[in-house]
Image (tube, helix red, strand yellow):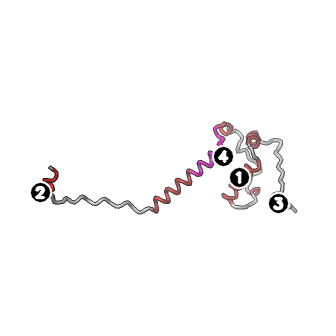
Amino acid sequence: MKKTKLPGDNISLKTKKTEDPLVMQWLNMQTNLMDSLRYLVENEIMLNGVRNLQAFVPMERNMLQGSPALQQPSEYRPHAAGMEQMAAAAEDAKDVEIAEEAPAAPAFEPVIDEEIDDDDIEAWS
């Protein structure tokens, strides 16, 4: 029986001898590998809930092979840039909510011609 992991326990990972070079590049680029992996796990849980991902992972996969565009440095974005984008999107969503809640602007009333007294005309002269 597999031992249940507890908070603070160590986990070990081993790469395949045939690991895709992009996977190795990604692993080596991380300044805090465990935090990066934790972030990916959190996103998986947020999108799909807690599940045995292995039941959904194809045995043969070659998603990264033949994708030279993925190797370009411009594809890598710092964490801060991603956080700024998320914050901007949240701010935009908040603006939309506020706009939807705001009462409609009052329609302008037509200007009513006032009677002008002779006394007013004399005061302007």
The mark that comes first in sequence, 4 or 3, is 3
Nearer to me, 45 or 82: 82
Q: Amino acid at mark 4?
A: His
113 drawn magenta: no
Element assignment for label 1? helix
What secondary structure characterizes most of the magenta part?
helix
Q: Which residue is mark 2?
A: 118
The mark that comes first in sequence, 4 or 2, is 4
- Residue at position x 19%, y 58% in the image: 113
81 drawn magenta: yes
Q: Which span is picked out in magenta?
A: 74-87
Q: Residue furthest left?
A: 118
The mark that comes first in sequence, 3 or 2, is 3
Element assignment for label 2? helix
Q: Which label number is shown at residue 79?
A: 4
The mark that comes first in sequence, 1 or 2, is 1
Name the spot of residue 87 as percent of width and height, x first: 58, 51
Q: Which residue is mark 1?
A: 39
Element assignment for label 4? helix
